[in-house]
Image (cartoon, coloured by chain):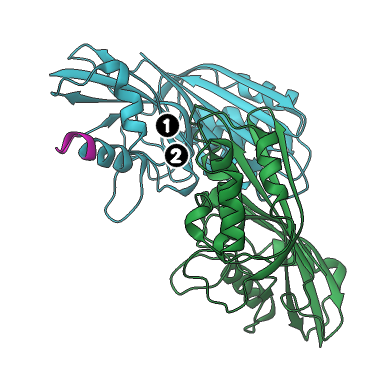
Chain colours: A cyan, B green
Amino acid sequence: MRRILLTIEYDGSCYSGWQKQPDRRTIQGEIEQALFRILGQKIEVFGSGRTDAGVHALNQKAHFDLDTPIPISKLASIINNQLPDDIVIKSAEEVANDFHARFSLTRKVYSYTIFNSQYKDAFLARRVGRIEYPLDEKKMAKAGKLLIGEHNFKGFASANTCTDNFVRTIYDLKVERDGDFIYVIVEGSGFLYNMVRIIVGTLVDYSLGNLTLDDIKSALKNQDRSKSGRTMVASGLYLKDAIY
Amino acid sequence: MRRILLTIEYDGSCYSGWQKQPDRRTIQGEIEQALFRILGQKIEVFGSGRTDAGVHALNQKAHFDLDTPIPISKLASIINNQLPDDIVIKSAEEVANDFHARFSLTRKVYSYTIFNSQYKDAFLARRVGRIEYPLDEKKMAKAGKLLIGEHNFKGFASANTCTDNFVRTIYDLKVERDGDFIYVIVEGSGFLYNMVRIIVGTLVDYSLGNLTLDDIKSALKNQDRSKSGRTMVASGLYLKDAIY
């Protein structure tokens, strides 16, 4: 029995997220179906974490156990042949038997793409979150600095987050502009439900003058969701890396 | 009563095509629902023609009749506010009462994007048709020249095309390469079911050595579908313009 780690790229536009659900197309469901067609047996694939409907991944990680003698070097292309083209196995490698895609994780990196334009663009719609009013990326970066470090992020999580522990560490938060596009890149120990989308929404609302730096400090200190910003749409969010 | 002509851009990735269908998301269905929310009445929208599931449009055209005094200059943005972001009304203009988006049409232009690469790319998947073996765009253009003019295109239509008249005129056919992308742009009097996708597949199969120029001539002369090429996937096809 070999434990295999997959690195996966996907366009989440037309999927109901990572996690398998009955009667819905999901990334995990598609990969498990592909493995079933190849191996003739039901295999459970464990992801580094879920991504929501419409969220994309550049390097999602997932593991599964393989008990047939397929050469690892051919595995990615064999699986890709059974997958829809908007899900791509970028690599497959053998890892230790106690490795776990979720529990062995040390850091995660997300990138959020804002399309900062007054114009709608049908072909960007499922790849970005659009903000029509001009944003100041320097102001956004300034607000982002407040969030770096270990904090209780309950004020930056969706109300229906199922956890007791809201403490996470943000190691880095960058804001970069390229023309009409603003990229917010956040690296952390882990993220609560909707946390990246609310962090980006908070930087946006600060830039637009809807929030002050004191509001953001208060959202952190008092775990007050009413002092953080909007939840950005899922379509702009990319799981950039899961680090072990 | 004013007749309104819409110019519409859409990413067809997550839609079951143009034409409304029960329990399916379609472009026509979304636009009619948007108009219903704005006007409080059922309005039928007539497109220049259908596009299949997954096919995109840069400038689809459609008309409808409006009997409320909304200023035309504001109509596009009013409708856009009620549409999902992957469907965009680019403009709305008043036309004569005898204008018809389908029957007044004189020409249509389609563009097909081939991603000519041995590598899969999840984010291109729903925007292109991928061919992994190297294509020669000059050979493709040479084969394309055979198709220009008035011909019976039954050999380049899907078997389940519902029409008695297979005669169409192709006014122009261009093949352009930009790096790994090849664009086939076809302008014609109209197109049969799957005709553009089969034309592009024929140029591809000629370039790959699966067909000869004589095969293509025979497909035209004898209306022989077995002598034309593969049907390319829907995702690479863009309705570029409908001309009146």
Q: CA distance from mark 2 to mark 1?
A: 7 Å
For the record, the magenta segment spans A37-43
Task: Identify the element where label 1 is drawn.
Answer: strand
CA neighbours of label 1 inside 10 A, class few (<14), some (14 to 19), many (20+)? many
* Chain containing mark 1: A
Residue at the spot x=70%, y=33% of the render?
Answer: B177
Identify the mark at residue B7; answer none if there is no mark.
none
Q: Please name the residue that numbered disc 1 is placed on.
A: A88
Magenta span has A183? no
Q: Residue at x 79, y 84 (%)?
A: B68
Type of residue at label 2?
Asp
Name the quadrant containing residue A219. top right
**Residue at 16% from the left image edge and 20% from the top image edge:** A69
Q: Quadrant of the N terminus of chain B?
A: bottom right
Q: Which mark is residue A85?
A: 2
Mark 2 nearby-residue class (10 Å; few <14, some 14–19, many ≥20): some
